[in-house]
Amino acid sequence: MTLPVDVSREKPERLVARAFANRSFVIGFVIAVSVVAMALLSFFWTPFDVTKLVIADKTQAPSLTHWFGTDHFGRDILSMVMVGARNSIAVALVAVGIGMGIGVPLGCLAAARGGWLDEIVMRLNDLVFAFPALLSAIMITAIFGPGAVNAIIAIGIFNIPVFARVSRAGALAIWPREYILAARAAGKNRTLITLEHVLPNIATLLLVQGTIQFALGILAEASLSYVGLGSQPPMPSWGRMLFEAQTRMAIAPWMAIFPGMAIVVTVLGLNLLGDGIADILDPKSRRRS
Amino acid sequence: MTAYLLKRIAIAIATLVLASLVVFAVLEIVPGDPARLMLGMNASAEQVEQLRTQMGLNDPLLLRYLHWAGDLLTLDLGRSLTYSVPVLDLVRERVAVSLPLALIALALSAVIAIPVGLYSASRRGHAGDTLAMGAAQIGVAIPNFWFALMLIYLFAVWLRLVPAGGFPGWGNGIWPALKSLLLPAVALALPQAAILARVTRSALIDVLNEDYIRTARAKGLPYRAVLWQHALRNAMIPVLTILGLQFAFLLAGTIIIENVFYLPGLGRLVFQAITQRDLIVVESVVMLLVAAVIAVNLIVDLSYAIVDPRLRGRE
């Protein structure tokens, strides 16, 4: 585990300069912003209406009118990819929120208290890790019914131990520091120390892990939608588009190519962004690249 | 050493017991009465009640759990509601597809990733390293089922080299069976290989910065020998950890991939059982998969002790 640096000591201008000198960060940042912008744009404008079926235009190859072609109902794939981005982002973002919201306090608590409490938190982690995440997500969504909300919960649950583990490891590295000793000598209790000293210092780790989990969440949502357990039609989602494309691979391969590319590019962008942030904020890792 | 092993084994068993409690609890809260399901909608309330008593469904919770866990341990898994065959037979038949698939994928992943990681670490910063890590970065981002679709399009629809899906069974010769597992295994392995290559590279780079590597070089050992004998062995711990985790991913990944390729494996079985609410099949397969994951993680933990002699002395 790398030790997080005390970010607050660095001047913001230098941090920004370092960020823009980092190739991973710049590429990842541009991709992530573009995907979010595309999703936001889809609320106001898409090239075609994704709810309107134009059977006369079905399974058209990519052209100047339909850049990504059309599906078996004559819907514009580009427009569907744009609207699908909303769904992917929303599900993954809330799932990360659940993971952080529950996992980070648990991890910090385990690190601050130690002893049997720590042991319980870690054993619960082992327990969740013993279930292949996708299998359990499928179980949860199948039992409680398919849909975006249950997909979020299913993915979110598996983010909890990830954040618990990362924040515990990060916090354990902070607790022996001298400034913590000073804070304790000054009479601060563990909760206050965690809030004022530990959390700001593990924020980097959490941010990096957050982008990774965000990317994994997008992949998980796509998998669930692909097997029909994610968000339901008529709301377009990338995974569902791939499912519909599968049986039409021979006649309309573009139905599969473009939603898949959307997933790859988004996940790639988020991973690069995470790598970039880690590089910028953690000087030790710079030796490696 | 013994203490380390015993602690690991104890944790594995405890995790398994906890996991079984979770599965049992989940199945308890799932709506639907197994007795009612078995008898059909036309059965009278008395008949259902009679069968419930007969099946032990009216016993106290703890007794039912112990009974259920005992059945699992003795591999008395019951009969599938939809297939009307013993679950054990069903599982045995499906494992014969999924286990080879997961193992081929794991082997492919290691065979691709470790040399790439070695190459990248030893040529760090050069064009080859940048190219390999760029490819790995993309590989990590590719969803395996989409990759599977692209493979089907390329090799089955376009080139017609392999079947697009289905499984001929091991009875009709090993070659046709392996052939139909090839694309699914590649689809499962490549994204995992990308992760593993990155881990191998960064683990090796960490090790190559160590003093003992400089010492080995200084005493005149050729670079290749240092890389293979000293660096790789020391970099194995993170690599093994990821391989163990990947086994769990691969097992879960088979659920999706087997659906893409219409393979009659465990993943497809559990997926269909979940959608058909065949809970007897679901609980057995889920417990089997969980036990497999725990066992693999235990093996990984134990293999640390073999790879890293320092662990043997501890505790």
Image (cartoon, rainbow, N blue to C red):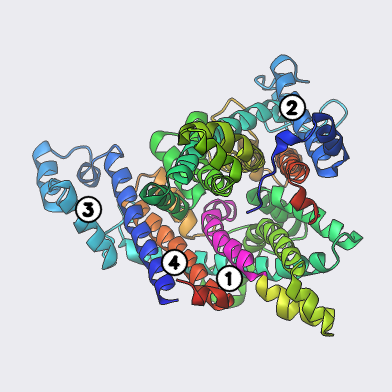
How much space separates mark 1 and mark 2, taking CA atoms? 40 Å
Q: The disc labelled 1 sits on which kind of residue?
A: Ala
Of A208 and B99, the residue lying toward us: A208
- Give the magenta-colored segment's residue range: B235-262
Write the residue at 12% across / 48% down: B59
How much space separates mark 4 and mark 1, taking CA atoms? 27 Å
Badge 2 crowding class, 10 Å Cα cut-off, few under 14, some 14 to 19, many 20 or more, is: many
Residue labelled with disc 4:
B295
Q: The disc labelled 3 sits on which kind of residue?
A: Tyr
Helix, strand, or loop for circle 4?
Answer: helix
The answer for which chain carries disc 2 is: A
Residue A160 image point, x, y percent: 49, 41
Write the residue at 88% across / 28% down: A64
Residue labelled with disc 1:
B177
Q: Nearer the viewer, mark 4 or mark 2?
A: 4
How much space separates mark 3 and mark 4, taking CA atoms? 22 Å
Residue labelled with disc 3:
B65
Q: Is residue A184 above or below residue B153?
A: above
Answer whether residue A261 is visible to the viewer in this image. no
Answer whether residue A10 is visible to the viewer in this image. yes
Q: Nearer the viewer, mark 4 or mark 1?
A: 4
Q: Nearer the viewer, mark 1 or mark 3?
A: 3
Q: Determine which quarter of the picture holds residue B239.
A: bottom right
Residue labelled with disc 2:
A76
Of A72 and B201, the residue lying toward us: B201
